[in-house]
Amino acid sequence: RWYRLAAEQGFAQAQYNLGVMYVKGQGVPKDYKEAERWYRLAAEQGYIQAQYLLGMLYETGDEGIPQDDLEAVKWYQSAAEQDHPQAQYNLGLMYKKGQGVTQDYQKALKWFRLSAEQAYPPAQVMLGTAYILGEGVKVDPVIAYMWFNIASKYGYEIAIKTIDEFQEYLTIIQLRNAQTMTKICMRNNFKDCDQSIKPEFSIA
């Protein structure tokens, strides 16, 4: 009741909270259309989490919400530009897949990096994957291992499994260099990590 009163008076956080309640069916019947309405009102006031969740609603098209990649990109972009790590990651995926936008690996990397710099493991894994596949960058197994290794430090299961398999394909020197890069990258708060391995750091 109080959330609704505050939401109807234009308070963005109350609008967002009411949207969450409609998604979860907490105190109100589960209703994604109502959730969309309240999320949008909060999102239009710049409420970042509402922008992100509105983007997710449009990307997935769940529970009667029309799937709309253009709207998803619009709201992910709004949240991503305000440093929301999950929105940055999701926007990167949209560019990687060409979903709602023209496929662009460089733009995908840009958003993955920004998200990875906020210690978001899925984005770190996507950077590692880009260096394995050569998507927007030159193939580099050492840098790829570094990013997977960083993500594994946060207990991200996909990264842990990948580095266990990955080790077999690296030489001892490559592996040591990747481990050195991991330490430097984390010490530098994930900034400029792709350039961390310089001659003065190379064990080779």
Image: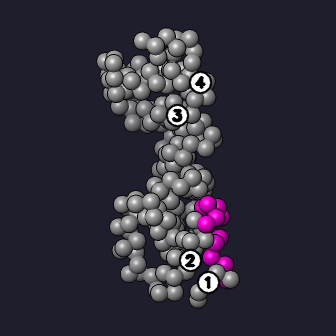
Answer few, some or many: residues within 10 Å of disc 3's Cα (few below 14, many 20 plus, some between 14 and 19). some
- Determine which of the numbered discs, if any, sits on residue 38 in the image: none
Identify the amino acid type marked 3: Gln
Q: How would you rate the neighbour count of disc 1 (Cα within 10 Å): few for under 14, some for 14-19, many for 20 or more? A: some
User: How would you classify the magenta stretch by its main secondary structure?
Assistant: loop
Q: Quadrant of the N terminus?
A: top left
Q: Earlier in the sequence, mark 1 or mark 4?
A: 4
Q: Earlier in the sequence, mark 2 or mark 3?
A: 3
Task: Tell whether position 192 is magenta.
Answer: yes
Tag 2 near tag 4, CB within 8 Å: no
- The residue under label 3 is 49
Picture coordinates of residue 145 (x, y %)? Answer: 48, 72
User: Whole-Å distance between the Cαs marked 2 and 1?
Assistant: 8 Å
Whole-number angstrom distance, CA of label 1 to CA of label 3: 42 Å
Discs 1, 3 touching: Cβ within 8 Å: no
Q: Amino acid at mark 1?
A: Ser
Q: Is residue 2 above or below residue 100?
A: above
Question: What distance separates the C-alpha of mark 2 from that of mark 3?
Answer: 36 Å
Q: CA distance from mark 1 to mark 4?
A: 49 Å
The three-letter code of the residue at mark 4 reads: Glu
**Is mark 2 in CB contact (under 8 Å) with mark 1?**
yes
Residue corresponding to mark 4: 44
